[in-house]
Amino acid sequence: MNSPGRSQRALPENHFLDLLKNEFDDARAAHQLFAGLLQHESYDRGFCLRLFEVAKPAGGAPWEIRRLAILMLEHQILKLDPADSKEFDFLFTQLNLKQSPRSKSQIAGSVLKEGYTTTEVRGFTSEFRRKLERYRRVHEQIRGPRTPWNAVCDFIQLARHDCKLSLARYLFTPDEVVQRILDQLKVSRGVKDLDTLEPAFAADEVRHAVDLLPDYEARILAGLSQSSNIYWVAEGTSSEINSLVEYPLTTVVVVVKPPGSEFEFEFKRAGRKHPNPLHIVFARDGYTVPPSHRLDGGGMQWLLRYEAKTASKLALVYRLVHGDDAPMAGYVARSSVSSVPTKRENAQLLTYFTEPQIFDKDFRRMRVAMGEAVEAFSEEGDAILPHLRGELGLTARFIGHVAPAQAILAGTSSFRLDKVALYLSSDGPKSYFTKGLAVPYTKPDAKRLACDLLEEVLGVYRPPEVSHQSYQNYVDAALSAASNRARADRVYLSLVLQIGKLWGTLLAARGYSRGESFVARNVGLKSFWSGGEWKVKIIFMDHDALVVPGPQTINFHAHGTLPSMAVDERYIWGKSNPKRFATSEVGYLQSIYRPARRVCVEGEALALRALKDAYRKTQNEMLTNPRMEKLFNQVFIKRLLDWDTLVSGYLQKNSSNPAWKKKMRRMMAAKGYKRRAFDAYMEIIERNQDFIKRYAFLFD
C-alpha cells in the first residue's frame, strides 16, 4: 500500500476518508470502525461486541472490513488487564474456545495443535496475549485522536494480511476460506493420481503430514484436496508477500497462507500468468533445458511421484532416528491434469496443445519445441508410445512423455533464502516493488517490507528507535538493536544446527540430491508458534533429484554418490570453493542474520557436531531398528559400516600397508563383495580424497 509522504501528525478527516477509499470498497464502514478504535483508548466490552458482530460470518460484512475488525479486536484485547479473568472468559466464549463465560471448563483441546502448551485458562491466557503481542510495533502507534498518518497506514497494511491476524482462524470458517481461495485462482478438471507401485510408507507419510496440522488448517486442506481439481494462477492472483493466495515472484507455484495461521500450502506447479498457463520449452538462451523443465509451468506425473516417494522416505528415516519431524514439506495430494484454462474456457489437453487458436502467435514455436522435446525423450530411452503420425499424434506422444500433473504440499515456505537475502539488501525494495510487483513505493512501504521480513526470520521483532534515513540503514539498525541482535544470533545457530542434522542423516543413509534439495532457491525460512512462543525453522523443499537407497540397493555405489554428495556440500556451505560461499545456504543465512565472526565460528562447530551426531545415530538405527529393514536392503545394512572402515583406514594411512589390505580383502570376501571391490573402493576414495578429508571426523 502506498502512503503519502506525510509527517507523523494526526490525520485530518478528509485525508482519512480518502485513504480508506483507496483501500476499502465500503470506506464508510471502515471509517466507522476507525472512529470507534480511536475513541476507545482503553478496553471496552461494548466496542468489542460491535467488532465481533462485524467480524463473524453472520454479520454479512465484506471480507476486508471483517479483517479490519479482527485486528481491532486484537488491539482491544492487548489493552485488557491480563488478570481480568472474567473478561477473558467472555472473549474466549465469543471465539468458541470456551463453552461458557460462567463455566469453569478448560480451553478447547484443539489449541494444543495450534502451538499452545496448556488448556488451563490462566496459562492459556498468558500465551494467548504473548502471541498477539507479536505486532506491538503496529498497535503501540495507535494513540487515539493523536494517531499519526503512517500509523493508520501500518494498521491497514497489517489488516490486509490474513495470516497475520491471530483471531482470524476463529472468525473465518474453513468453508468460506476455501471459497475465498478459489475466487483468486483458475480451476480445471483433473483425475486423482493413484500410484499402484507406491510403497506403503508414502501413504503413511501423507497421513502423518495431515495429522500434524491443527484442525482449522486440516479442514481447509481437505476442502482443497478432496476433489481432483487442478489449481492455476489467475491474472489477479497477488504476488504480494503474506497474501492469502500468493504467486511468489519468479516461481510457478501458488501458495496459500490461511487466516491466523503459520502453516502454508503449495500447489506445485500452477502455471504461468500469461494467457497460456502451460507452454513447451526445449531451449533457453542457447541452452537446452533439463527434461523436467520442458513442460513449462507444469509438473510431470512421474517426477512428482518420484519426489513424493523419496522425500517421504527421508522424512520417515529422520523421524525414526531423531524422534521428531524432519524440516521438510509434506506431500499430501496429487492429481493428473485433464484440462487447462484458456482465454475462453477450459480445454482438454489434446485440444490445448493441438489447436492453433489457443496459442495464437506462439503456436508454431510451441509445436517446434514439442517436436524437439519428443525426439529428445525418445533418445533418452523414454519410449512411452509408438510413433503416431500427424499433429494430434505428436501431441499424444508429448503428453505420454510428460503426463502433466499437480501436487499439493503442506508445510512449505515462500520465504526462500535467496529471496529473503535479496529483499533485505540495499536493492531489496527496488527488486520487490519495482521489478517484482511493478508498483512504485515510498519510504514507509520499504520500512514495512523490512518489518515483514524481519518478523519472519526472527519470529519476534522490535523496530529500532531510529529515523528511517535509508532502507539499508534501517535494516542495519534493526539487526544491531540489542534484543533483535541476540535473537538473530540464537535463530542463526538453531538453523545451522537443523541443516547439519538433516544432512548428517542423509549422508549416513548414503543419500544425496545433487544439490537440488539444498540450493537456496529451494530452502525457506518460516516463523511458527510452538511451545507457547515464536520460533523459526528452516524448510527443505523440491526433492526431485533426491536419491535414498532402496530395497533393491545392495552396495554403496560410491563412484557416482560421492561427487553428488560434494554438490550438496557446495550448496550447503561451499567448503570446496570459498568464492561460492555467499550463494550457499549458510552464506545466505549469514547475509540475512549478519552474525559476528565469533557466532559464525560457533555456528560452524555446532553444525559439524550436529552432522556427526546425526550420522552416528542414523547408522545405529539402520543397524538396530527393525523398521529400517522395510526401507533398505538387508545386505546393504549389513555392509553399511564397511565404507567407514575403509575410509578410516585410508585416513590413518593404512592404504599402503599390505597387512591392512589383506585384512580388508578378507572382510569384503566374507561379506560377498565382488573380487575387485576393495580396489574399486580405494580408487574412489583416492579420487575424492579432498571431500573425504573435510569430513574425516565422521570416521573417527
Image: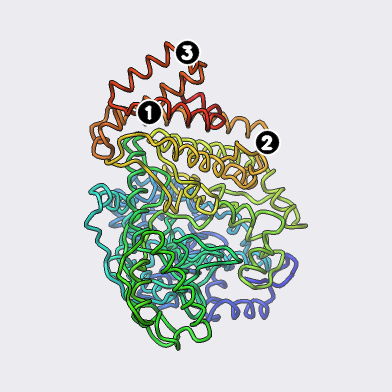
Q: CA distance from mark 2 to mark 3?
A: 46 Å
**Label 1 environment density (alpha carbons within 10 Å; few <14, some 14–19, many ≥20):** some
Farthest-out residue, front = 675
**Residue matched to label 3:** 657
Name the residue type under label 2.
Ala
Give coordinates of residue 552: x percent, y percent: 27, 41
**Color scheme of the displayed model:** rainbow
Q: Secondary structure at mark 2?
A: loop
Specify the quadrant that holds the N terminus: bottom right
Q: Nearer the viewer, residue 205 or 2?
A: 205
Give the mark, 1 or 3, whose residue is nearer the N terminus: 3
Please state if 325 lies on the left or on the right of 197 as rendered.
right
Q: Nearer the viewer, residue 643 or 420?
A: 643
At horizontal 41% and vertical 71% (from top left) the residue drawn is: 181
**Label 3 environment density (alpha carbons within 10 Å; few <14, some 14–19, many ≥20):** few
Q: Is residue 49 above or below residue 572?
A: below
Asked if residue 47 shows in the view, the reply is no
| Residue depth check, mark 2 versus mark 1: number of the one nearer the observer | 1
Please state if 423 lies on the left or on the right of 472 as rendered.
left
Q: Secondary structure at mark 1?
A: helix
At horizontal 52% and vertical 64% (from top left) the residue drawn is: 251
Give coordinates of residue 115: x percent, y percent: 39, 47
Give coordinates of residue 101: x percent, y percent: 32, 56
Q: How many marks?
A: 3
Q: CA distance from mark 2 to mark 1?
A: 47 Å
**Residue matched to label 1:** 677
Disc number for residue 596: 2
Asked if residue 110 shows in the view, the reply is yes
